[in-house]
Amino acid sequence: MTNTTAESTLPDNFTSTEISHKEAIETVIDSLQQNDSAMVHHDDQGYLWKFKYGSVQTYVQLTGETEEDLLIETYGVSTVTN
């Protein structure tokens, strides 16, 4: 058995783009949301997103962008009635 290691280098025109936690959360929510269910609330205490994915109502709260800030996720299953 032979172990090989491949090294790759990034092209010269490659640029690394850092995005904020807010942007990352919104990108993920945008890719998951169904039926235009996403809502966002912003105030001086941070951001709160609410969206539905399938039958699950999801809340995501971000208190800020520093390492001391909190990211809180809450999930709740919707009751389906006919």
Image: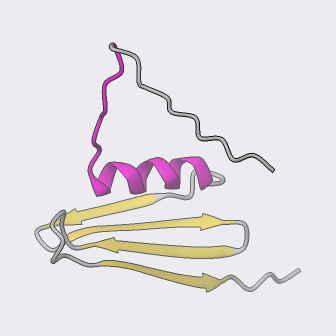
From the image, give the main secondary structure of the stretch colored magenta: helix
Residue 48 in which image quadrant: bottom left
Q: Quadrant of residue 18?
A: top left
Query: Residue 4: x, y in percent?
Result: 65, 41
Residue furthest top in the image: 13
Q: Is residue 33 magenta?
A: no
State the image coordinates of residue 76 (x, y, percent, origin top left).
60, 85
Residue depicted at x 39% and y 51%:
24
Residue drawn at point x = 36 percent, y = 21 percent? 14
Q: Determine the residue located farthest toward the front in the rendered image.
A: 1
Query: Is 29 colored magenta in this rendering?
Result: yes
Q: Residue furthest left?
A: 44
Name the residue at the right extreme.
82
Of the pair 44 and 13, the residue shown nearer to us: 13
Q: Residue at x 60, y 66 (%)?
A: 52
Is 54 rendered above or below residue 21? Answer: below
Pick the residue in front: 79 or 24: 24
Q: Which quarter of the rendering shows the C terminus?
A: bottom right
Q: Is residue 68 left or right of residue 7?
A: left
Could you tell me residue 58's position as x and y percent? 53, 74
Q: Looking at the picture, does residue 75 appear above or below residue 18?
A: below
Left or right, 80 with respect to 73, comes to right
Region in magenta:
13-32
